[in-house]
Image: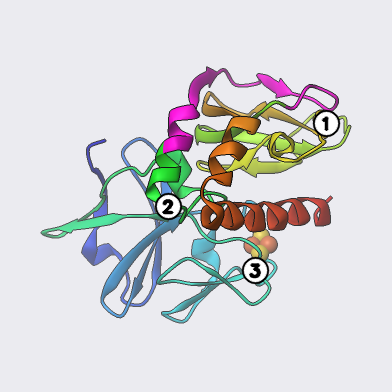
Amino acid sequence: MTKKFLCRVAEIPENGLKEVAAEDGEKLLIASSGGELYGYQASCPHQEVALCEGLYDGSVLTCHMHLWQWDIRTGEPMGIAEAPLRKYALAVEDDSVFIAAEASALDVGELFRGISAPTSEKLMALARSEQHEAGAVLYGPGDAAEDFFILDSGRVEFVLGRVERTAPGGFMLNKGEVFGWAALLEDYPRRIASARCLEPSVLLRIRGKAALAVLEEDPASGYLVMRRLAALIARHLAAR
Ligand code: FES
C-alpha cells in the first residue's frame, strides 16, 4: 500500500491529541509525546467512544467513559484496561504526517500481534480472503464452528448468544480483530454467537484446526495466543 496523507505536523498540539481522517476516510488518533508522534485507532476498544475526547497527560491516555488507560508509546493497556490500542506506523515527511504502510490484519490485531514471523507467515498462508456485503450474516448460534475470521477491512458486529436485535448492539469489530474463535477451542464444534457485516467487509478465513497445528509447532507463540484468547473470551462474557 502506498502511504496515506493524514495531516500537517503543525496541526497536532505538542503533547496533545488529534483525530484525523486519511484520504479514504479511515480515522486515526495521533498523539504527540516528547516530540514523537504515535498513531492509534480513533475509537476506544471497549465501546465506540472517540479517544480524542479522553484525558491525556502526554504519556498516558485515559478514555473518559470508563477510565481505561494506555501507554501512548506502546498502546499497551494499563490499570483496568483490558485491551491494547491498535497501532499504526506513521511517517513524517517535511511538514506532513502519513500512515507509513499497512500492516497485515494478522499483525495489527490483539490476538496474534507479537507472534514469531515464521508462525505468522504460516498462519497467513492458511488464510483465504472473502468479501461480504453490508448486512451479510456470517454465522449464527448453532452453526458449525470450523473456521475463525480476522477482519481485514469494514466493520462487523459480533453478538454472543441468541439475541434478537434490530440495531447494532454487540461488539463492533475493527481491522485485525478476531471472531468465530470457537473454532480455536477444543470440543466446541458449534457457534455460540452471531456475526454480521455492518458495512462491506473483507475477512480472512482460517481453518481452526490447521491454525492450532501451526501454533503447536511454536509453543511460545501458541502460549501467547492462548493467553490472549482467554482474556478476549473473558472480556466478551463479562460485557454480556
Ligand atoms: S468506552 Fe472507553 S473505557 Fe469504556
Label 1, ligand 1: CB separation under 8 Å: no
Mark carried by residue 81: 3
Task: State which mark lies toward you, 1 or 2.
Answer: 2
Label 3, ligand 1: CB separation under 8 Å: yes
- The percent coordinates of residue 193 (x first, y second) are 79, 34
Along the viewing direction, whichever of 102 and 30 lies nearer the viewer: 102
Q: Residue at x 70, y 26 (%)?
A: 146
Q: Residue at x 64, y 77 (%)?
A: 79
Along the viewing direction, whichever of 127 and 177 lies nearer the viewer: 127
Describe residue 50's horizontal placement relative to residue 114 as left or right. right
Residue 135 inside the magenta-drawn segment: yes
The mark nearer the N terminus, 3 or 2, is 3
Mark carried by residue 236: none
The mark nearer the N terminus, 3 or 1, is 3
- Marks 1 & 2, CB-CB < 8 Å contact: no
According to the picture, the residue beneath numbered tag 1 turns out to be 165
State the separation of the CA atoms marked 1 and 2. 39 Å
Residue 195 seen in the figure: yes
Residue 123 inside the magenta-drawn segment: yes
- The percent coordinates of residue 8 (x first, y second) are 22, 58
Residue type, numbered disc 3: Ala
Task: State which mark lies toward you, 3 or 1.
Answer: 3
Q: Residue at x 66, y 72 (%)?
A: 67
* Element on which disc 1 rests: loop
Residue range of the region highlighted in magenta in the rendering: 122-145
* Element on which disc 3 rests: loop
According to the picture, the residue beneath numbered tag 2 turns out to be 116
- The percent coordinates of residue 10 (x first, y second) are 22, 66
Along the viewing direction, whichever of 68 and 190 lies nearer the viewer: 190
Residue type, numbered disc 1: Arg
- The percent coordinates of residue 144 (x first, y second) are 78, 22
How many marks the image carries: the answer is 3
